[in-house]
Each structure stands twice: as C-alpha cells, then as structure tokens.
Image (cartoon, rainbow, N blue to C red):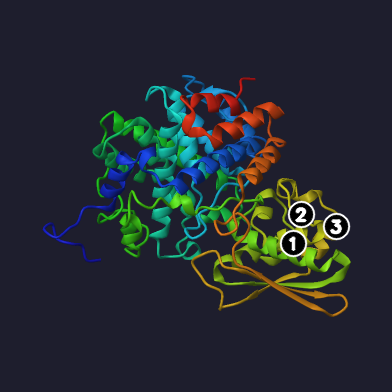
Amino acid sequence: MNQPTASTKRPDAAFALAANVERTRYENLPAKAIEVTKQDILDTLGCMIAGSTAEAAREVVELGREFGGTPEASIVGFGDRLPSHMAAFINGTLGHALDLDDCHDKGITHVGPQTIAAALAVAESGRAGRVDGKTFIAAIAVGADVIARMALATKIPLQQSGWMFSPLYGYFGATAAASRILGLNQEQIINAFGIAYCQAAGNLQVNIDDEHALTKRLQIGFGCKAGVMSSLLACKGLTGARNSMEGRWGLYNLIHRGEYYREALVDELGQRYEIANISFKPYSCCRQIHAHIDAALRLRQEHGLRPADIRAVTIFVNTDPHWLCDPLPLRRRPPSVVVAQFSIPYSVAVALHNGKVVIEDFNKPARHPESVYQLADRVTPRHDASLPTRIIPPARMEILTADGRRLTTEVVDAKGHPNNPLSWNELAEKFRDCNLHSVHPLDSSAITRVVDTCRHLEDLDDIGKLAALVAPAH
C-alpha cells in the first residue's frame, strides 16, 4: 500500500469530522435534520422501552446493579441509576435488542441507539451542567452523521468484509455525540476518536449460519459505553491516534484495505446531515426484510389471499440479502429470536398468514400454529443478479396460487423510508406499542408527555426531564 509522503499528506478525515462535531449547533442544522432527529429520539426511546423485556435485558441490568457505582444516569424502562458508561451500555443494548431501531438504508447501519444512549448518559451525569433540548438535538444529529458517513464511505459490502457496520462505526458516532454534549474542542475530539478506534469492533459472525448470538445486540451497547469512556478520557487529557481513519493503520486502511470513498466522509460537512435520510422500522426485524414483508402484505390484501390459496412463494434476492434465506431449513423454522429477526421466509410467511407483523412474532417465534411454518416451507429464494447491490434492494415476489394464478409485485422503498415515511402519529403509535412490551409500562398520560416532549424538544430546558419520563424510579 503506497502511503503519501510527509510533504503531500492531507489531514486525516478525523480532523474534519471532529471540527464539524465541535461547531455543530442546533441553529445551523437544516430543518429536515432537526425534525428527523426529534423523531429518532422518540423512536429510539420506544425501542429501549420495548427492549427492556427482550433477551439479555434482565442480565445486563442485573450485572449493572452488581457493579453499582455513582448513580449518574438512568436505565430506560427500569429506572435504576448507574455510572454513565454502564447506563450507556445497557440502554444501547436495549435499544437494539428487538432490531426495531432506525436504519440508514443506503449505509446499512443503525444510528439511534449508539448516539442517544451515549449522549443521554453524559447529559444526565451533570458533567456538562444542565443540557437543554437544542444541545441534545445537535449532539444526536452530528453523531448520527458520523456513523452514516463512515458507512457510506465503505466500498466493501457487509457480507464480503465480515464487519458489522452499526457497532463498528457506532463507536465513533457515540463518541461524537458524547463529545458534543461535553463541549469538547476539535483537538479533544480527535483524541476521543483515536481512543474509540482502539476499542472499535463489531463482527458479522454473531449473525450468520446457525450462530445468531445475543452479542448481536450487545455489540451496540459496547460501542455506546466506549463512546462515553472515550469522550471522558479525552476530556481528562488522554490522547489517542490522531489519524484514526486514514493513517497507515487507520480504520479504512487496516480494516478495509484502503478501499473507501473519502468524499463521503468529508463532502458538505455542516451542510448535509445524513440523519435526514434515515428510515424508521415498522417491523421488529432486519431492515433488508421489510420490503419483502410489505410485498407479502400487499399481495395478500389486493387479492384476498389466505394460506390455503398459496401453493408457492418465490422471493427474488441478490447476493446481499441472500444470507437471510440460508440455511433455508433454519430460516423457515427459526428456533430462536435472533434467527427469526433475520429470516425472510419466516417473516413473509407470518405476513401472508396473519395479515400483519407485530413485535411478538419475533420475540416469541415458536408461538405460531404449525400452519405458519408449513407456509414458510413454501417460500423459496431465487437469485436475481439484476437487483442492485450494496444498498438495500427492492423486493420482488411471485405467488403461485392454488388455482394456478401467478401474482407478482415489487416494493422499492419499504414503509419507513424517507420516500415512504412514518408520520409523527405513526411513530407515536409505534411508541405506544413498544410500551406494551416494557418491564414497567408507562400510563397513557406519561406516553403523551414523552411524545409531546420529543416533538417540541427544542423547547426543553433540561434533558434530564425527558430521561425521568422514560425511566421513572421503581
């Protein structure tokens, strides 16, 4: 690998990103970025609340209680107060546990749990004084921008690299959000990025073949914890690698072997905030499955289909989401929550069988009657090389009916995409549904206050008031 000489070497992209973190203010955010950021905060808090009863939630909370420590920040849903780094770890894990959290479709990455868990923990800790809603919005917007830009800069696709982008880049986004809350300067943020880089990880092995480990959700929590620790260590004056992204052994040269789009990292910084391009999930599963669910629901509704009417279902996939069908017997009859969350055949069968897809379909995949799995046995993938790669592709589906009809459809932008968005009212309804799965459900008046607070977050004088709403003491 040829490295630039000292005289021609340009500043690492980490410098430009750090400068943008320092200078980002609510007042210079585009209106669309502000609106989507507020929606993302509501959506992610709802995902954390619902995640409080998911697998791994009780265990990580119990471990946090065993550790104890200074009661700095709240655990959403539970109400415990723990040191800020542990609160960030737990809340980040809860936020991603159901795979119901936001997604930057083009970058194939999540941004909400990492940035919101880290920023909320630092904001509640009091280390930055009282943090208002405008500052919090700015922190989430710029933290999400870091994650999305790093993902967009990546040339090697997810399945070829073996790295899971959400946790890998989440270390940097969580650090950016926490650093913005703390008011760190560019030099401190550069160091914070370097400290985050020495911890950054996140692999796809947890989520392929028959693995499907609960570390899929823990990886996000680890990045949140590291974001808090990295920003606090930099605040104390500790240093990290300055060229953490483009140095000789920086992230893009070490992990991606120099294959990346630099312009995605640095172009239009401070003008375009990628959080404006995120999608919100109506279904508690991998985002690459959502368009297939939409396609199944569309064909069912348009043609009045019932399970007995369906002889065979063909789903057309390219190389990127094909792993969501392999190994096929496992995906048709998922034995665990995580396998269900990453199975196209199972999800399509549920949609065609029930006419809807809800959180419980993935939380408890074994609850269904045998007829659901018999329908899943009739769902078969077919490789279609014409479908685009690198981004979440359209869903093409063909259903052969019992009376010989061939019904086809294609969904380009799944529900929740910026081109097919969820409204504030739909996000509020999703929050209410999430609350039904909370370890300590909120009453209706508290739900209304959370929704209204997020919708008008720029008017909030203390973000701790929002934390108190979603993490009341028990």
Q: Please, what is the three-letter code of the amino acid marked with disc 2?
A: Lys
Q: Do the residues labelled 1 and 2 touch (CB within 8 Å)?
A: yes
Residue drawn at 42 percent across, 56 percent down: 151
Distance Cα–Cα, label 3 vs label 2: 17 Å
Tell me which corner region of the image, top left, top right, bottom left or bottom right, holds residue 451.
top right
Q: x, y percentage for residue 20?
A: 31, 45
Q: x, y percentage for residue 397?
A: 69, 71
- At mark 3, the secondary structure is helix
Distance Cα–Cα, label 1 vs label 2: 7 Å
Residue drawn at 33 percent across, 48 percent down: 270
Closer-to-camera residue (335/81): 81
Q: Mark 2 points at which residue?
A: 356
Q: Can residue 201 be seen in this view?
A: no
Residue drawn at 41 percent across, 49 percent down: 145
- Mark sitting earlier along the chain (1/2): 1
Q: Please, what is the three-letter code of the amino acid marked with disc 3?
A: Glu
